Structure formats: C-alpha cells, structure tokens
Image (cartoon, rainbow, N blue to C red):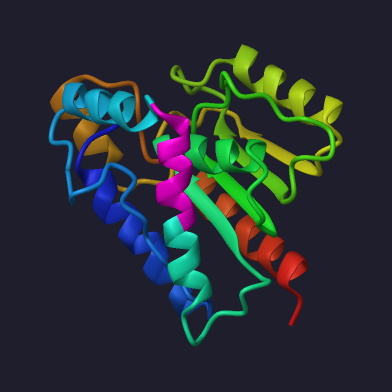
Amino acid sequence: MNPASHTSGVIEQAEKLAASGYTAFALDMYGSGKQANHPDSAQAFMQEATRDMEQVKARFMKARELLQNHDSVDPGRIAAQGYCFGGAVVLNMARMGVELNGVVSYHGPLGSPLQAEAGKVKPRVQVYTGGDDAMVPSEQVAGLAREMQNAGVDLTLVSFPEAKHSFTNPGADAVAEKFGMPIAYNEDAARRSWQGTLRFYEEIFGE
C-alpha cells in the first residue's frame, strides 16, 4: 500500500464525486488522522486497522450513519468506493452484509479471510484492477470472480492490461521512484475506471 501521496488522491476523488452531483464522504480508516509517509508505516497501519474486522466495520458503519443523516443524502441510496487498502475495506463490508447499493474497489487486495455467502451480499460490486499489479496477482482476481459467482453476487470486474498498482493516483510515480515500489499512474485506466464508476452510480441510483 502506498504512503501519504495517496491521501490527497482520495480527497481529490471525493471532490470529483461532489462535482458530479453526489454527496461524498472521505473516511479515515486508520483513525486519528494518521498519514503513512513510508511504505513500512503504511503496512503497519493497515495491519493494525484490519486486526479486528468488527472494529473496521464499526468505524465504517459510523461513517455510513453520518452520511445517511446528512441533509443532502437519501439514506436508501448509498455506495462505497475505496482505493488500495480502502478497496479491500469496501469489499469486506459487502462480504459482511452491510446495506449498500454498490461498492467499487480500485486496485485493492481481492483476497480475504472473509468469504461472500449467498444471500448475504447486498450491493452490486465493481472491481477495477491492474493486469500488471504485483500486489494483486491473477490468482486473487480469479479467486474473487469464483467467490462472487458462487455467492450469486452481481459483479463487474475490469482488468486493465499493463496497469500497475495505484493506477488512479497521479502521485504514484513519485512514490515509486522514491521507494522503489512497483506502482504507477495510468491515465487511461484512471479515466476509464472513473467513467465506469459514474455509469455504475447512474444505474444504481437512477435519476
């Protein structure tokens, strides 16, 4: 998981959602405003945050409650999207039966100790992954497709050839150079995944 530059990228994505007419809420899953300035600290924060999945769910549900209670929000029309670690979080919330209309995961880990069960997953699911993502190997992609199909989940899975991890993040190249990480921004994959997400929201939310 890449460090601090991704924080600004997530905020930028939330602002893009708002500019498209949606109410957007950027959730700090690490808590206390922590920012990872090195891959090692990012990994440590992620491990700490996922040690107790019920705690992760509780934090997510509190954010969902805040969003539902906002004056601009229809509480029956909510989706969650996540990037890298956040992509894993939103998939796990779907696996845990959280009431959502849709979830979107961008270059997130796809494997999980949690497994989708038939009738438990409420939202439609979209996953965007990189065909050259060293952190999300093809075995995870195939495993997710099998898992979701066996559970009867409405899944759209898109793999972009040559796209590496963090392909939506314009700051990924600088992080890759600084820390020697196999990540990179991919303008085409970023554009197409964003367009696909907006179409997805139009479908699940209607007018």
Residue drawn at (62%, 58%) of the image: 197
Residue 72 is at least partly visible in this image: yes
Which quadrant holds the N terminus?
Answer: top left
Query: Where, by quadrant of the figure, is residue 184 drawn?
Result: top left
Residue 143 percent across, percent down from the top left: 69, 18
Is 173 positioned to the left or the right of 201 in the image? left
Residue drawn at (40%, 49%) of the image: 59
Q: Magenta includes 84?
A: no
Which quadrant holds the C terminus?
Answer: bottom right
Magenta segment, prevailing SS (helix, strand or loop): helix
Residue drawn at (55%, 15%) of the image: 137
Of residues 9 and 49, which is closer to you in this image?
49
Is 149 positioned to the left or the right of 200 in the image? right
Query: Where, by quadrant of the figure, is residue 94 drawn?
Result: top right
Q: Which residues are magenta?
A: 52-61
Residue 154 percent across, percent down from the top left: 81, 44
Is 67 positioned to the left or the right of 129 in the image? left
112 over 129 or under it: above or below? above
Q: How many numbered circles are shown?
A: 0
190 over 119 or under it: above or below? below
Q: Magenta includes 55?
A: yes
Residue 78 percent across, percent down from the top left: 61, 66
185 over 206 or under it: above or below? above
Residue 84 percent across, percent down from the top left: 42, 36
Residue 84 is at least partly visible in this image: no
Residue drawn at (25%, 30%) of the image: 45
60 over 149 or under it: above or below? below
Q: Residue furthest bottom?
A: 71
Query: Where, by quadrant of the figure, is residue 49 drawn?
Result: top left
